[in-house]
Image (cartoon, helix red, strand yellow):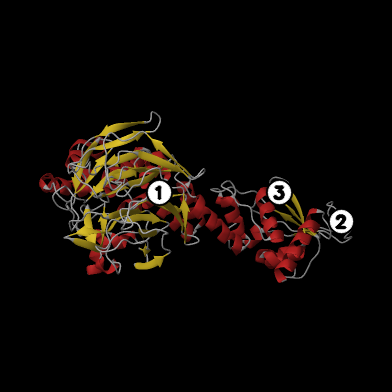
Amino acid sequence: MADVYSQGMVSVLEDLRRRKVFTDAEVVCTDDGSQFPVHQVLLYAACPLFRETSPGGNQPGPASTINVAAVTPGAAAALAPEDDVGAAIATTKQGQQSAAPTGGSGGEVRNVPVAGVRGDVMAALLEYVYTNKVTLNSDNVLSMLLAAQRFQIERIVQKCHEFLSKDISVANCVRILEFAREQKHPSLVDMAVNFISGNFNEVAKTNQDFVRISYDDLKALLSSDELNVSDEGKAFAAAIKWTSADAPNRHRFLPSLLSAIRFGLCKVSFLQEEVFPHPMLDDVDCRAVLEPVHGLLEQLEVHEGPRMINLTHPMLRPRIPRDVLFVIGGWSNGSATNLVESYDCRANRWLIFPNDRDVMPRAYHGLVALDGLIYMIGGFDGSQCFNCVRCFNPLLHRWTERACMHVARCYVSVAVLDGKIYALGGYDGDRRTNTAERYDPASNTWSLIADMNDQRSDACATVVDSKVYIVGGFTGQQVLNTAEFYDPKVNVWTYIRAMTVPRSGVRVINYQDTVYVLGGFNGTNRLATGEKYDLLRDRWLELPNMHTPRSNFAVAVLDDLLFAIGGFNGTTTVPFVECYDSKTNGWRRVTDMNINRSALGACVAVNLPNSREFSVVGNSEREN
């Protein structure tokens, strides 16, 4: 009842203001002449600053005018300092009634002078005063934040921060940081710095404002363990770009910036071809910074295995990845396992987390990451197939049970589309199935969808262009080369051109918006071959062979690299990991997992808030 009453009052008050009924004050924006009839009592109730500056404290006084000067973000000088309230709102007595109509109120109109807000911003502030609603957009949010802080309307300040946390982008993050520094907003500074750090490659490369970042901010970014750079060459390029934008005045900062770059993690070829001969580094101070790098060259040249790292050496200390690759479960040493490993892509190391094991081992399951959680779907423990779903929260290090599927499924194919999880085909312990179902995390329910055209176990699925693609698999009698996609808009499965070879135990993934198919078993041999689907021409194109033939392995995309992890090579389960780089169109080996395993699941938790805990640096801190 109270809510209905409040809503009714808000509606009435806004109507009175719009029709200028009983309005006894007028806000005038002096820079653009905007005028706003208002009710004094509401201004005093909503805005402490008006109460503090009104004649006689909170008592109504003689008529006066509110004059508001325009301010744009980045021009904070146009706003009076926070401690200069008199400059923000100057009250001028006037003996005559305002020319604004008062809807028959018959009283004097109070005019109170205020400095520091544009007319459109004042309109939005008054909208909040009368309706408890505020209209924010990319064009007005910084001005609104300034004005709300000035007039001590904390609710709008909070709303502005919430809006900026969602609206911040590669294009505007530097401007937001400048604004936050200028206006002394610590929480906004932290948000902007965290965004720039997390998207550093793209910000440094594409944001035209990047070169306006202060030296102090750039040095702090380059020095941070949290700087998200796929390789230190990106950090070096950013330092050179910033310095070059004003070389006469900035070159003196370059040695300090270079000292923050972890050159020991760079490739020797990069150091020899890009760093040492760079013309901007040909001075005594820069050469002094690079001298220790020359001393590392011999060790770096012979270190072909896992990347040489040293947590106490400033040039060999790995940074913290934002995205974490998890591998969970699988078949190892003749039985199912529940072991959890994570891959630190900055250190090129696999880490075991024994305390994060689930209560029950499983293999031949599906694994997906969605909204910060990891879902383990179906699977097999060595004696039974599961329809149950387990959910791991990496932030809390906790497993929970979720709703069971309609059908038990091991050798299941899984995918994520539009916030829903798809479980397709598989083996229920009796037969291979063509059934499919979809999970809604919000309602914790599974719903059956249209059956696939083929029975498929040991197939694999991915999502491209808002459609679920599934390839290969085993029917119980034959290994399949067929492929089809599901369109959720029409609830129909449609065949595409068959792959060039049949594959079960195959893996498929969306890599650079293309369906990539890797490895598998063709009925005779394990495969190292791969192919990708050309959607426009409905054809399959050959990919370079992996170093290791494998089936029932795991795949993931991390740092724009395609990883193939573990599996069965035809003789034994393997720990081998390799990655494909489209820029070189080739595979290269990376560090092996800690154990051999096949039938494992892998997924990437993106922007994991506690990614440090799953890194080499965090693991070392925990052990110490």
Q: Residue 290 in the image: x percent, y percent?
A: 19, 46
Residue 103 got which mark? 2
Which numbered dot is residue 537? Answer: none
Q: Going 58% across and 46% down the picture, which residue do you hit?
A: 139
Residue nearest the viewer, comparing 339 with 16:
339
Give residue 85's quadrant in the image. bottom right
- Compare residues 120 and 435 and report the one nearer the observer: 435
Identify residue type, mark 3: Thr
Relative side of 568 to 322, left or right? left
Q: Name the side, left or right, on which 67 lies relative to 466.
A: right
Residues marked 3 and 1 touching at CB (< 8 Å): no
Residue type, mark 2 in image = Gly
Q: 605 and 336: which one is in front?
A: 336
Q: What residue lies at 27% left-to-right and 43% top-to-bottom? A: 478
The reply to whether residue 248 is visible in this rendering is no
**SS at mark 2 in the image:** loop
Q: Which residue is mark 1?
A: 214
- In space, the residues marked 2 and 3 are separated at their CA atoms by 24 Å
In the rendered image, residue 41, in percent from the top left (x then y), is placed at: 76, 66
Tell whether label 2 touches label 1 (CB within 8 Å): no
> Measured along the vertical axis of the image, is residue 48 above or below residue 233?
below
Residue matched to label 3: 30
Given residues 222 and 128, the one toward you in this image is: 128
Check disc 1 and report its element: helix, strand or loop: loop
Mark earlier in primary sequence (3, 1): 3
Q: Is residue 112 left or right of residue 350?
A: right
Q: Is residue 348 left or right of residue 189?
A: left
Figure quadrant of residue 396: bottom left
Q: Residues within 10 Å of mark 1 (few under 14, many from 20)?
A: few
Query: Mark 1: which amino acid?
Result: Ser
